[in-house]
Amino acid sequence: MSFGFKYGVSTESDLVFDVRCLPNPYYVEELRNHTGTESCVRDYVMGFEESQKLYEKITDLIDYLVPLYIREGKSQLVIAFGCTGGKHRSITFAELLSKHLTEKKFKVQKYHRDITKDKKF
């Protein structure tokens, strides 16, 4: 799941990752009205070494944790990514992790909570 911190922290999540530490596409005029579901935003966000390293570290952690949660009987795990408005960085990371987990044969549901808030496009 993705969300924007300016609309409140995701309270239904088991794990929350704050990606506000990464460069923000909102401040790039030609990206502002796009979302992390689009390649132009994804390419911008993931075009930075710190974004790639953070994603690698998060996927390593998730790959380690998921089997532990399964072993303990947890049938659902809600993983959330938050950025300022919930339209760019958080969606990019949620989309990438969703793809990663799907490739590992896990059942995944995506939800971008704040993608349409303050919609200007």
Image (tube, helix red, strand yellow):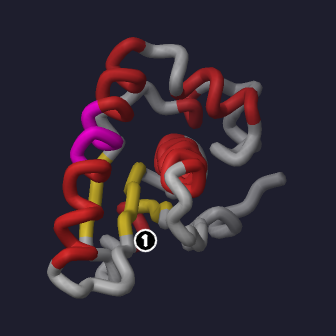
Residue 85 seen in this snapshot: yes
Where residue 58 appears, as percent x and y from the top left, is 29, 42
- At 68% across and 37% down in the image, what residue appears? 32
Task: Please check the rendered image and state whether residue 58 is part of the magenta-colored stretch, yes or no.
Answer: yes
Task: Please check the rendered image and state whether residue 18 is part of the magenta-colored stretch, yes or no.
Answer: no
Give 97 or 69, whichever is nearer the viewer: 69
62 lies left or right of 28: left
The quarter holding residue 7 reads: bottom left
- At 40% across and 22% down in the image, what residue appears? 52
- At 25% across and 63% down in the image, what residue appears? 67
- Type of amino acid under label 1: Tyr
Q: Residues within 10 Å of mark 1 (few under 14, many from 20)?
A: few
Q: Is residue 20 above or below residue 65?
A: above
Q: Which residue is mark 1?
A: 7
Regarding mark 1 in the picture, which secondary structure is present there?
helix
Give 61 or 88, whichever is nearer the viewer: 61
55 lies left or right of 108: left
Give 26 or 56, whichever is nearer the viewer: 56
Residue 111 seen in this snapshot: no
Where residue 96 appears, as percent x and y from the top left, is 55, 43
Q: Is residue 50 above or below residue 82?
A: above
93 lies left or right of 53: right
Where residue 5 appears, as percent x and y from the top left, is 36, 62
The quarter holding residue 51 reads: top left
All told, the count of numbered labels is: 1
Give 117 or 9, whichever is nearer the viewer: 9
Most frequent secondary structure within the magenta stretch: helix
- At 64% across and 23% down in the image, what residue appears? 43
Where residue 59 appears, as percent x and y from the top left, is 34, 42
Q: Is residue 57 above or below residue 121?
A: above
**Magenta stretch bounds:** 57-61
